[in-house]
């Protein structure tokens, strides 16, 4: 097993404490040379032959199997490609077809907006009287009844880090006859996940956060193996066809998880992700989780002692949150910009949430202590109170 952290495996700017891996993971050192090799030797020399000789066509399933090992899924139950929004649409549309007599999709107000946008768009397009019902995160279980077709949740809240009990909610949903879809955007690579144990039907997730796949890295979708054959891919793209190069005019879905493929895979980005995932070889997720909780607890203790102006927005119990800590502050955006200028990179989520991710692959105790000290200095000296720090960038 690898000893953590493994900072030497990442390109991290000198003097920067990176607490934003929950939004975009840093660059693994081995990715750039692998991409260069892929471009010059595979694309450059093999040209179109790379689809066969370099294994580009099989890459979405091959990379999916690597991710499956991190999220407790069986081999052949995860495929990579397209965006998270597309994968949400695929999973939810399939779930609704499994429960044609039910009309309610249940989600919560802590879900990432794109999941809710995609759900509303799908339900409006179907125009069959479906309802998207949104409740407070703590009220999900109590609102699951026999009217619910699908429960669609993000396991770890992107703002606060609040963590749902995946197994418990899935059991309740199944007892009421509902299908369950989990978004693992803030879970995969951050907390131990066991999809097989949870028995959920679908899961989706992105790969550019804790999995370090790079900006815009493709998403993944999981389908429980026993329902694979009955899942109809509404987005019936040619690479989800049973024989895409037969070029038949009628669609026949592939027999396994590849039926959830849609379009041509982004091979360069997929290659970056495949290389980045090698970092996880030998990483004990339970050990990583414990270190994450320890670092997060240390940060909370120091910030609350040193920065009384801030209010903890995350659950205090480490077991109830993911691998991030959030604090609320009226001028949180300006504080985050000041932090970035002083070598601590976190991020901001409206209306007043400062987010800090704790990734034990490259964050250690000394980083946490230094970050909290810099935060204290910025608040005590009001270093954040400058017009330049109040100018909101397009990406916050």
Image (spheres, rainbow, N blue to C red):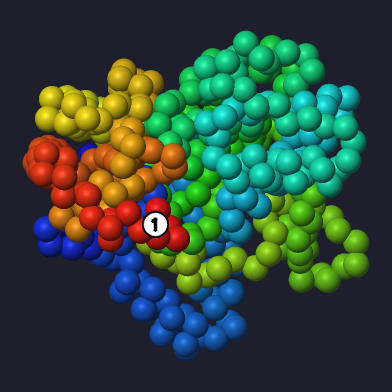
Toward which corner of the image does residue 102 lie, by quadrant?
top right
User: What residue lies at 75% left-to-right and 46% top-to-bottom?
Assistant: 121
Left or right of 396 on screen, residue 198: right
Position of residue 380 in the picture relative to residue 274 (left or right):
left
377 up-or-down from 7: above or below: above
Up/down of 161 relative to 354, above or below: above
Q: Residue 373 in the image: x percent, y percent? A: 9, 40
Residue picked out by circle 1: 392
Q: Is residue 277 left or right of residue 240?
A: left
Percent position of residue 110, x then y = 52, 31
Are there few (<14), some (14-19), or many (20+) residues within 10 Å of tag 1?
few
**Above or below, 7 relative to 319:** below
Q: Quadrant of the N terminus?
A: top left
| Residue for point 31% across, 42% down | 331
Please tell me which residue is depicted at 70% across the width and 26% down the height of the picture: 133
Q: Nearer the viewer, residue 202 or 118?
A: 118
Q: Residue at x 39, y 49 (%)?
A: 23
Label 1: element kind: loop
Q: Nearer the viewer, residue 62 or 368?
A: 368
**x, y (%) of residue 229?**
77, 40
């Amino acid at each position: 097993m690898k000893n953590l952290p493994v900072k030497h495996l990442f390109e991290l700017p000198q003097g920067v404490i990176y607490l934003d891996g929950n939004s975009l993971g840093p660059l693994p050192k081995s990715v750039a040379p692998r991409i260069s090799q892929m471009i010059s030797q595979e694309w450059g020399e093999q040209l179109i032959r790379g689809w066969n000789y370099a294994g580009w066509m099989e890459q979405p399933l091959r990379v999916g199997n690597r991710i499956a090992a991190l999220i407790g899924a069986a081999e052949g139950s995860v495929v990579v490609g397209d965006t998270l929004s597309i994968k949400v649409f695929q999973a939810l549309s399939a779930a609704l077809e499994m429960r044609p007599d039910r009309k309610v999709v249940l989600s919560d107000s802590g879900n990432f907006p794109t999941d809710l946008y995609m759900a509303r768009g799908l339900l409006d397009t179907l125009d069959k009287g479906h309802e998207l019902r949104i409740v407070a995160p703590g009220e999900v279980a109590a609102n699951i009844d026999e009217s619910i077709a699908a429960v669609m949740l993000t396991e770890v809240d992107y703002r606060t880090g609040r963590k749902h009990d995946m197994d418990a909610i899935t059991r309740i949903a199944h007892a009421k006859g509902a299908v369950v879809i989990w978004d693992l955007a803030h879970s995969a690579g951050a907390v131990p996940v066991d999809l097989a144990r949870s028995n959920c039907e679908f899961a989706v997730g992105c790969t550019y956060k804790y999995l370090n796949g790079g900006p815009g890295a493709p998403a993944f979708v999981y389908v429980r193996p026993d329902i694979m054959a009955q899942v109809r891919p509404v987005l019936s793209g040619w690479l989800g066809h049973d024989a895409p190069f037969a070029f038949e005019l009628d669609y026949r879905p592939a027999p396994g998880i590849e039926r959830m493929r849609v379009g041509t895979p982004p091979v360069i980005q997929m290659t970056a992700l495949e290389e980045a995932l090698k970092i996880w070889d030998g990483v004990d997720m339970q050990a990583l989780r414990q270190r994450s909780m320890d670092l997060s607890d240390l940060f909370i203790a120091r910030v609350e002692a040193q920065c009384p102006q801030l209010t903890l927005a995350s659950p205090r119990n480490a077991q109830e949150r993911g691998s991030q800590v959030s604090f609320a502050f009226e001028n949180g955006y300006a504080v985050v910009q000041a932090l970035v200028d002083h070598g601590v990179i976190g991020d901001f989520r409206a209306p007043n949430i400062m987010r800090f991710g704790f990734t034990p692959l490259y964050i250690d105790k000394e980083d946490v202590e230094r970050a909290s000290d810099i935060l204290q200095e910025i608040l005590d000296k009001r270093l954040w109170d400058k017009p330049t720090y109040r100018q909101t960038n397009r990406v916050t």
